Image: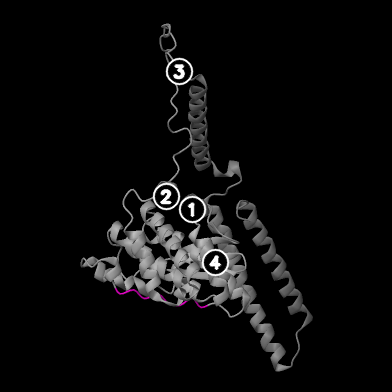
Amino acid sequence: MDVDVRGDDEVGLGTARTGPPGPPLRDGELAVVLGAALARSALGALPHDRRAAVAAEMSGLEARDVAAQVAGRRIPGAAVHDLRDVEQVGARGWCARALLAEGAPALEAVISVDPIRLPAGGWGHDWAARVPWMVPALVGRAAAQSGDAMARSVLALRALGDEVSDSPAAADDPAAATRAAAAALSAPRPVPGAAAFAPAPPPDADVTLPAAAPAATRPVAVPPPAQPQSDRRLLAALATAIGVAVLALVLVFAIIASPSSFGIAGTSEVNERLSVVEAGVSQLRGDVGTLAQQLQSGGGAPADQLRELREAVDELRGEVQGLCSVLPLVC
């Protein structure tokens, strides 16, 4: 059973085991024993002059008040939160479950409860006084919210409170927790106060309403299903698509039969103009090579050669434009 004091008004509670859960009855017995030992350890952490006052309050606990605190997830002066698995250091007392599984009674099992580590001073003492009020919630976690186990934990706290209030030194004796647990476990069933820890029934669970009489119905004639009509818009769209396909096919054949009518030259005319452009490019390449040799030799370039070269370039430009005239789609 783990208790994590997080602040002045908040506490974390959790339970950890060293093995899988056992039978509910055995787990409930062990949880009551551990709870009594935890409460006794908390009383032992209090100053001697405060033990009697806190124990007197424990001796007056009522099951209905404790059940309301558990349901509201609160203890005196603090809210209760759940501890995550990583926040629980584990309760060494759960090693006693191995003995209980073999049939040993809870009071004969080896019980070990770690002392509550709280800071010294008034703040730590205040929290030590609150720890016994956490025991029923911890017992409920360990015993799967068993109403009998939680009611027995209240009886154990009351028995421990009676003994410590009469003799504050009893809080230093572990046998005081054993006697308190024995008194709680010996209570016959139904355990006094167990009904207070039973889950509340859903609201209006036992309220029944008379069933309403079925309303009179009158047969209604069902109209015959309407005959599906042909969609004229679909037929018109289909006819339009067929017409467009026929026109496109006619246009393709017309272009193939007379390409010149559509600005497209025949293959022979294109080849002829390409050969003229190719010859002009070859002649221009030769003239440029000759002119480059004369310039490298330092002789200079005659004016008539430059004029002839310029004319050849202009002529070649005209041939390229003529080629574009027969290939308008390309140029």
Q: Is residue 185 above or below residue 88?
A: above
First in sequence, mark 3 or 4: give its number.
4
Location of mark 1 (residue): 62
Residue drawn at (20%, 68%), measured in percent from left and top? Answer: 102
As drawn, the residue found furthest toward the bottom would be 297
Q: Could you tell me if residue 138 is visible in this image?
A: no
Q: CA distance from mark 3 to mark 1?
A: 84 Å
Location of mark 3 (residue): 230
Q: Nearer the viewer, mark 3 or mark 2?
A: 2
Q: Quadrant of the C terminus?
A: bottom right
Prevailing secondary structure class for the magenta stretch in the rendered image: loop
Horizontal and vertical percent for residue 272? 55, 58
- Crowding around mark 3 (Cα neighbors within 10 Å: few <14, some 14 to 19, many 20+) is few
Q: Considering the numbered disc 3 on the image, is that residue within a helix, a strand or a loop?
A: loop
Q: Nearer the viewer, mark 3 or mark 1?
A: 1
First in sequence, mark 2 or 1: give its number.
1
Horizontal and vertical percent for residue 309? 71, 75
Q: Amino acid at mark 4?
A: Val
Q: Quadrant of residue 157?
A: bottom left
Q: CA distance from mark 2 to mark 1?
A: 8 Å
Q: Considering the numbered disc 4 on the image, is that residue within a helix, a strand or a loop?
A: helix
| Front position in the image: 306 or 116 | 116
Disc 2 and disc 1 in contact, CB within 8 angstroms: yes
User: How is the structure coloured here?
Assistant: one colour
Label placed on residue 54: 4
Q: Amino acid at mark 1?
A: Glu
